[in-house]
Image (spheres, grey):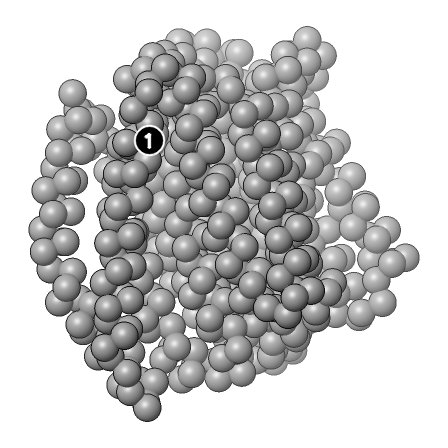
Amino acid sequence: MPNSLSSKILYSLKQLLVGKILYTVVGFISAYAFAKQLGPETYGTWQTAITFLGYSVLFAMGLPFVMRRDFIQFRKEGLLEDAYNMANQVLSYSLLANPVLSLLLIIYAFFFVHDKNFFYGLLAVALLNLFNIIGGFGDILAKAYNNYSIIKKSQFILSGFLVFTIALVYLFGYFGLIWGFIVAYFANSIYYYITRPFYYKWYWNNSLLKKMMVIGIPLYFANIVQTVFSSIDRLIIAGTLSFHEVGFYSLASLVKTPLTLLVSSLSIVVFTELNEKFGKDNSVNVVKLHLEVPQILVSYLLPPIMILGIIILPAITTFFLPKYIPGIIAAQISTFSVFFLLLTGFSSNALFILNKQKLEAFSFLIVGIINTLGSFLVIKIGYGINGVASISVVSYFVYDFIMTYWVYKNINDKNHFKIQITKYIPIVYVLLIYAFDNYFIRANNVYIESILQAFLFLVFMVPYTFYIIKKIKTLNININI
């Protein structure tokens, strides 16, 4: 393991990305295979059902997120028994809480769902939620120990079963997809149990649980509103339009997945490494390391990748998934919402270090209401999934701005507007180049148009690339100082 902080972050990021890149590539291929084989309506049905898997956070009371911070800090201080007790308390609570969600999904499926595919999808998600008790807990522990090789191997396992699931889908259709996911999640939970860093045991301490809940409840509410409002667009589309439209809307995942892979991995590694190095230190410099450096890095690196994906998406969709062409514009628009949402991951980490999680809940509640009401409004007006995608961009831009504002307000830094503007300059610059590119390059053939636009865009990106390299070197110096 390298000695400098920036080298440690880079090393850990490489370890984490190895498995995640493979899983993303396989996931990209499998998503294409599932979408092509099942069609928009059936695939949209599964996309709607799997959304409920994230709702396990509603029963977690924020405990896993408290553990994500305090477990690392206990280890840094040498309080291993306290760390193990906290971990076992979280696991014991999950063993009671997670089955509640599974039971509710089963009841809802049996008494309120009439669509056969959606019914079986919800039953499968109820089972996945149970398997995820050990799988999700093991993932948190691996990150707490900076043992990203464990996560890498987990991604290898999931990738292998995804390939297996592709075969099942071609042989058995929708039910092959369901059983493929069930087997994959089961195998992943078994792997994490076998590789556990210490022996799990039932542990219950009311005083410890109460203390963790006091810390975790603000974050719990933040995750409730974030989980609900992050998935509300698909649920609204399914409820007001159709599963068919959800299938079109899911095309956005082809662009979202690679972007989320890189940035979410960076957020995890930066939080863990800084927490391990500085412990409970929440001084201004430490908070800024959690926020400024990664946000600036992402704001410069991500926009060119995003725009390139937007340029080539029409050609890829036309060639590989012609049935999903109606979802192209919504997918292109949704890319920008992902950009703003990913930036908030770092401001969320900073607020967590400052013990200001309640501000995150308040922020997302406002944004969630905007997103929900806006989605209903644009659908009623007639803008469909393109309107929903546009509302999500506006909502997540507001969310990112508010979250960053809270961080700087709590460290008494009044230069946040200047820093905010600096953060948004790269995406505006790259977007202007794309607009220029799109205006002058027009062709009757979608493939020729995409190739010419991509070529011209890459030419204009050459001076920008040199600037990025210079910026990254500066950031590296700042981290190590």
Judging depth in this view, the residue of 319 and 208 nearest the camera is: 319
Q: Which residue lies furthest to the front in this view?
A: 381
Toward the bottom, the furthest residue is 444
Instruction: Tell me which corner region of the image, top left, top right, bottom left or bottom right, holds residue 51.
Output: bottom right
In the shown orientation, is residue 162 left or right of residue 446? right
Image coordinates for residue 346, horizontal then vertical, percent: 39, 34
136 horizontally vs 454: left or right: right
Label 1 crowd bin: few (<14), some (14–19), many (20+), radius 10 Å: some
Residue type (three-letter) at the residue carrying disc 1: Phe
Q: Residue at x 26, y 46 (%)?
A: 425
Q: Going 65% across and 74% down the picture, which residue do you hit?
A: 244
Label 1 sits on residue: 417
SS state under label 1: helix
- Residue 117 against residue 469 in the figure, above or below: below
- Tell me the quarter of the picture where residue 304 sits: bottom left
Image coordinates for residue 92, horizontal then vertical, percent: 68, 26
Q: Residue at x 64, y 43 (%)?
A: 369
Which percent across, then down, holds residue 293?
A: 26, 32
**Quadrant (top left, top right, bottom left, bottom right) of the C terminus:** top left
